[in-house]
Amino acid sequence: MILNRTKKLNTDMIALSNIEKVYRTSSIETLALNNINLTIRRGEFVSIMGPSGCGKSTLLNIMGLLDEPSQGTIELDGQRVASYRDKELAQLRNQKIGFIFQSFHLINDLSVVDNVEIPLLYRSANGKPRQTYAKEALEKVGLSNRMKHFPKQLSGGQKQRVAIARAIVGNPEIILADEPTGNLDSAMGNEIMNILQDLNNDGATIVMVTHDESMAKRTHRLIRLFDGTQVQ
Amino acid sequence: MLTNYIKIAWKVLLRHPFYTFITLFGISLTLTVLMVLTSFLDHLLGSHYPETKRYRSLYIERMVQTDSSRTSRNMGPMSFRFLMDYAKSLKTPERVAICSVFNTSNAYVGSQRIKLGTKFTDADFWRVLEFQFLEGKPYNEQNIANGDYVVVITDKFREQYFEDPTESVVGKNVEIENINYKVIGVVKGSPITRFFTQADVYFPYTAPKSNYQTIGLRGMYIAIVEAKQKSDFKAIQNEFQARVSRIPLPREDNGFKYSVLEVGCETYMDNFLDTFLDGGSGPKAIFTTVIVFILFMLLGLPAINLVNVNVSRIMERASEIGIRKAFGAPIRTLLWQFIIENLFITFIGGAIALILTGLVIYFINTSGWIAYADLTINLNVFAVSLLVCLLFGFLSGVAPALRMSKLNIAEALRG
């Protein structure tokens, strides 16, 4: 994939205004996010911290267009997404965002290379270039020798590196990472963090949810949430 | 993309062998039943030995005589004379064969009785029908005009009657109902399901007990009208009906006075349905509805069951759906993925069904349940089976796919 990160670093990549998220059941309403106003600039590496259940993952899901806010507006790279339909949202996610999850979320029935290829499947990329890009991404995370392996044959750290390869294979401008080091020991966590920092140095905008202060300290900015409200 | 879907479908199949067994068992059993049924219908209604020209043949099988008050009627086959006068002389067809309905006779080998099915036919019978002569030849107009006591027999009767079936029997005599006939030819027998042609012994219509000289319109004969091409059917039917309509009415046959006379000249299918569904379009519609209902039960119920199995298995794959959606799969693409997966599974079931059908058909053909049965998986049957596979895969794939593709991504990822 050809890098296209020539825009100025000072422009806004993600802008959230008055975001509110309410989970409703028949008897209970839970306010997960309350009046969040947040701007993340292009090329920034931001971490989000807060106690369990404070809305960190919900906020990340909303940024990544995986969930809809109950109220408020989202702008991604200057595009207001409120009126976007499923197909347009899918396209935006596919082209602009890469996701890394705490529990990796690899498809166990597919090989490492097939897992990494997934975002490219939805860009109508042909089989041959798809494999080339997937191989390149795996090389970046140091796993090109595990291409034909299946997720069950990998360690936690290797799985997370596959997940990172999948997140970056389409060269997205934004990487959203939900506790990417949460299931790893500190050495492996550091390794993953190094990869993320390298990606950020290459120009990717990264938002990372974490519980780990030491990891958060390695990012440009820290956002703290408490009970669905931004406190820092 | 397709390879990716098929890889996943294959892995999903391997993941739960028991579910896979249940799914494939359901699909293949249903398809086998459907394919055997289709094959049997094709055997019953299609153009097969010796009625290979059935697709361009019309059948004059019964006459209906109704009295003026429409309270009583007589129906059945016709006299030889009627068919000679009104069918044989038609101008539009290629040719017309006349033969009797199925009769029975006895022959004896020593003290052992052989029950025979017999038919009296004209010479054109052997031209309209394409019997395979294993030895000898058919009788012709000359044999008939001479009143020769000759017969064409089937290979089965040859085996039963003659001591050495490998030896030629042409020119040898067979004694049927105490009369000696010379065997002029031996044919491969016709399956019992082909009512117009099936018999063990074929006599010229001038042979004893043929009743070909019966006076009156009713008798024991039927006619097979071979058209030059299928498109001539309408013209032949019009020509025939125009002739029949010139018969003066009312008239009397064997003491029954009637003022309405109907004689059908129909395709094999219409004639077949009329035989079972006397009474016009109403019963035919009911029959069609019943057939559609049975097909629905055969096809629809397993499909609904499969939908249920699929829907319950879907939740296992919530995470995969979440991942695919997160990385840019639109709903429509996911829908196709799951439909393709289901079609793939259905085609595997279809392939198993094809093998099972082959085995069942082989068993039917060799078991002797239906004499001379020649059920096949021909192109028509295969096309119907493929269509059924597609429909089945689609039916059982759409509902689960719709449900899956609408899953909220965040919830799907949470599992």
Image: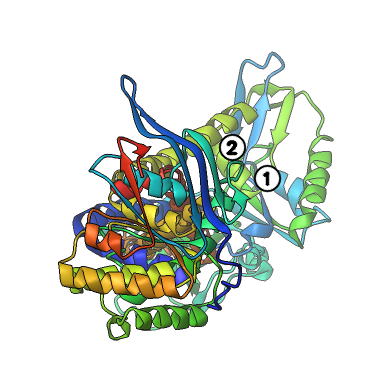
Q: Can residue A104 be seen in this view?
A: no
Judge the density around disc 1: few (<14), some (14-19), many (≥20) Cα neighbours within 10 Å: many
Question: Do dots 1 and 2 share one subunit?
Answer: yes
Element on which disc 1 rests: loop
- The residue that label 2 is drawn on is B274
Q: Picture coordinates of residue B387 (x, y %)?
A: 52, 56
Compare marks 1 and 2 and give the one earlier in the sequence: 1
Q: Please give the name of the residue rendered at 60% of the width and 57% of the height, measured from the top-left corner.
A: B206
User: Which residue type carries mark 1?
Assistant: Glu
Q: Picture coordinates of residue B135 (x, y %)?
A: 49, 79
Q: Please give the name of the residue rendered at 29% of the width and 69% of the height, measured from the top-left corner.
A: A193
In the image shown, does B74 or B336 lie closer to the viewer?
B336
Judge the density around disc 2: few (<14), some (14-19), many (≥20) Cα neighbours within 10 Å: some
Q: Please give the name of the residue rendered at 23% of the width and 71% of the height, measured from the top-left corner.
A: A190
- The residue that label 1 is drawn on is B266
- Label pair 1/2, CB-CB below 8 angstroms: yes
Q: Does residue B359 appear left or right of residue B37 in this picture?
A: left
User: Which residue type carries mark 2?
Assistant: Asp
Count of marks overlaid on the render: 2
